[in-house]
């Protein structure tokens, strides 16, 4: 009998969404409600769980486990679909020398959207504010960048956008060449997530070259991280929405590496946390060589 592989299960869920024409890490912040969260704990989902649940575009993104439904006196509507949520659990293993070692194990459980649960006290279901409210999104983006304590040098006026690990420099086109201000910041956030992988920050593997596996994973990390930062600032995510061919290249990589999505989501979350933790001021979420310019190894948008 084939051994159950939770990484494969998670990857297949993402592939299903991509094949349905949905890119889970593109967040329609101005058309849907708040971040997916558990109704009982009120905590927003993180990492893979966030992207996966968001991709279904629920009007009311609140979820309950089967046991939570029972505890609240509710019932699950017949034919309702459940959604897998993953988590890490530490298991203790005894070593030969008598010591114990904690090893993280990936586990999952199923949740149901509140719209598929009947018999709940409506007063216990919070009214979530939509992201489509008045705010100065550009100011919010600029504040994160201006207050970032160890951000790289950001050069503008270039003909392309990229991050250069060897010099820890981000290159960006002139902001005026972008169709929208939010498009400029979403592109810049993409490069910022790349730079957090530098050896002096989170030390991710930045040795990839265009087309290889590590480059593809790094691009996926940057996409997911940029989308999260866009959501925090309250702007519509405009990262990587250029072609079906690019999505198909992701599908190919996903099918050849069943750990890619889970690992990329984890790295993206760490990158965003790093940026937000290295600020002069706390971030307030709106949801709350030569004459010839050489192009070195870089991660470009």
Image (spheres, rainbow, N blue to C red):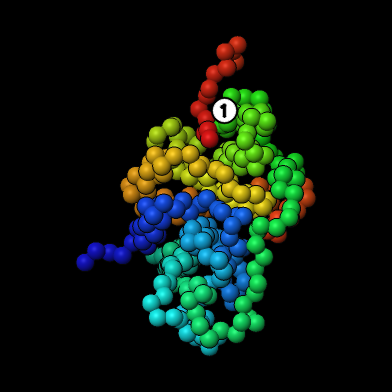
Q: Which residue is mark 1?
A: 160
97, 264: nearer the viewer: 264
Position of residue 259 measured from the top left corner of the image (x, y, whole percent): 39, 53
Q: Residue at x 75, y 45 (%)?
A: 139
Residue 269 visible from this viewpoint: no
Q: Is residue 234 left or right of residue 262?
A: right
Q: 106 above or below 126?
A: above
198, 20: nearer the viewer: 20
Residue 295 visible from this viewpoint: yes
Position of residue 297 measured from the top left corner of the image (x, y, whole percent): 50, 27
Q: Residue at x 55, y 43 (%)?
A: 239
Q: Within 10 Å of the Cα at label 1, are there few (<14), some (14-19), or many (20+) other Cα atoms?
A: few
Q: 128 above or below 68?
A: above
Q: Is residue 232 left or right of residue 298?
A: right
Name of the residue lying farthest toward the right: 281
Q: Is residue 37 left or right of residue 140?
A: left
Q: Total label count? A: 1
Q: Residue at x 48, y 76 (%)?
A: 116
Q: Quadrant of the N terminus?
A: bottom left
Q: Secondary structure at mark 1?
A: loop
Name of the residue lying farthest toward the top: 291
Displayed quadrant of residue 3: bottom left
Q: Residue at x 67, y 39 (%)?
A: 181
Q: 107 above or below 261?
A: below
Displayed quadrant of residue 168: top right
Position of residue 197 measured from the top left corner of the image (x, y, whole percent): 56, 41
Q: Is residue 175 left or right of residue 101?
A: right
Name of the residue lying farthest toward the bottom: 73
22, 193: nearer the viewer: 22
């Amino acid at each position: 009998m084939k051994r159950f592989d939770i990484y494969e299960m998670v990857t297949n869920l993402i592939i299903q969404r991509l094949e349905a024409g949905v890119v889970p890490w593109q967040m329609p912040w101005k058309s849907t409600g708040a971040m997916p969260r558990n109704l009982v704990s009120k905590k927003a989902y993180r990492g893979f769980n966030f992207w996966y649940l968001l991709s279904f575009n629920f009007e009311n993104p609140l979820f309950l486990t089967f046991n939570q439904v029972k505890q609240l006196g509710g019932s699950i509507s017949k034919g309702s679909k459940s959604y897998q949520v993953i988590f890490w659990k530490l298991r203790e293993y005894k070593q030969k020398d008598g010591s114990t070692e904690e090893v993280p194990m990936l586990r999952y459980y199923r949740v149901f959207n509140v719209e598929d649960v009947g018999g709940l006290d409506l007063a216990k279901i919070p009214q979530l504010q939509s992201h489509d409210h008045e705010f100065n999104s550009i100011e919010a983006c600029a504040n994160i960048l201006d207050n970032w304590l160890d951000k790289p040098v950001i050069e503008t006026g270039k003909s392309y956008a990229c991050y250069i690990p060897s010099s820890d420099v981000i290159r960006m086109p002139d902001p005026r060449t972008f169709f929208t201000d939010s498009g400029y910041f979403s592109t810049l956030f993409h490069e910022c997530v790349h730079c957090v992988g530098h050896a002096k920050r989170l030390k991710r593997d930045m040795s990839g070259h265009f087309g290889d596996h590590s480059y593809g994973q790094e691009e996926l990390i940057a996409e997911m991280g940029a989308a999260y930062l866009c959501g925090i600032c309250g702007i519509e995510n405009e990262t990587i929405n250029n072609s079906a061919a690019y999505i198909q290249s992701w599908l190919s990589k996903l099918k050849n590496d069943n750990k890619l999505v889970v690992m990329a989501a984890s790295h993206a979350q760490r990158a965003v946390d790093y940026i937000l933790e290295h600020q002069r001021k706390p971030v307030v979420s709106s949801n709350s060589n030569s004459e010839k310019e050489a192009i070195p190894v870089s991660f470009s948008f």
